[in-house]
Image (spheres, rainbow, N blue to C red):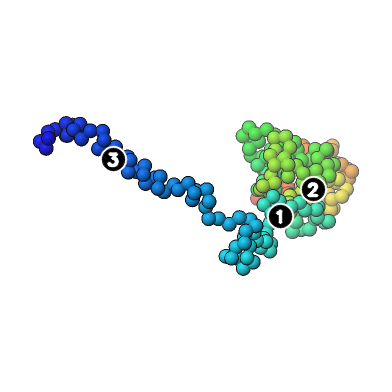
Amino acid sequence: MRNAPPGQRAAARGPGLRAVPVLALAALALAACDGADMVSQPKAKTWDRNGFFPQGRTMLQPVPGTVPRTVPNPPLPQPAAASAELLARGRERYGVFCTPCHGAAGYGDGIIVQRGYPRPPSLHAARLREAPAQAHYDVITNGRGSMLSYAAQVPPADRWAIVAYLRALQLSQDVAVASLPPDERARLAARATPGDPGTPDDRTEPADRAQPGDRAQPGDRAQPDRTGGARR
């Protein structure tokens, strides 16, 4: 059969010879899977003595400073006062997480809203200006309506910073003229249309406010324009 074609030589060997490698592999697999070793593996249980650790036991105390996995961001109380640092942090975090929907000035005209995302309510609506700070904090934490929770992205301290900046933003867009410094009142009087000079008790209306992209933010400074005047 030495000179026979390969097909005839394979047929001459028969199925028994071809089965030898398969049986050898099966024997090796069974040898590696000892039933007793699979059931009784060497391991350390919670309450076992364990000479590997200095305390002599398997279960150890957490190291100092360990934060429980179940409460990664424990709630914080509302700050007693809004410092300049808190407002600066809130403005920066608002710009990162809030402007895409709410817009830079809080009118709900953010960039993704301009591209079709549901428009959120204006943060200057009466009910939101009158809502307590805790209510805004809770919305950031839990979400509401089409707004998802930001608890994973914004830690509690930053939530309060955003709420503080939101209050400053609301105040900046709804201020009684009488409460403004004299130079600001003069600026508004110069902008008033003929026949409607405005009175010290007037409040700025949405039509008188700067438009998206040119709205003043708390802390912004007036910048000179090309005509030598001043703009925000």
Which tag, 3 or 2, sits closer to the chain's start?
A: 3
Tell me, for residue 200, which label it has, or none.
none
Q: Nearer the viewer, residue 160 or 102?
A: 160
Q: Is the C-beta separation of discs 1 and 3 under 8 Å? A: no
Q: Nearer the viewer, residue 27 or 166?
A: 27
Q: How far apart are the two marked residues, 3 and 2, measured between alpha carbons? A: 82 Å
Residue at image mark 2 = 167
Residue at image mark 3 = 20
Q: Is residue 118 left or right of residue 18?
A: right
Identify the residue at horizontal 65%, vertical 57% (top origin).
47
Residue at image mark 1 = 89
Q: Residues within 10 Å of mark 1 (few under 14, many from 20)?
A: many
Q: Nearer the viewer, mark 3 or mark 2?
A: 3
Q: Mark 3: which amino acid?
A: Val
Q: Please state the horizontal and vertical placement of residue 153, each as a whole percent of the image.
A: 66, 48
Identify the residue at horizontal 55%, vertical 55% (top origin).
43
SS of the residue under disc 2: helix
Q: How far apart are the two marked residues, 1 and 3, measured between alpha carbons? A: 74 Å
SS of the residue under disc 3: helix
Instruction: Indicate whether 210 appears above or below 40.
Output: above
Which tag, 1 or 3, sits closer to the chain's start?
A: 3
Q: Mark 1: which amino acid?
A: Arg
Q: Quadrant of residue 68?
A: bottom right
Q: Is residue 165 visible?
A: no
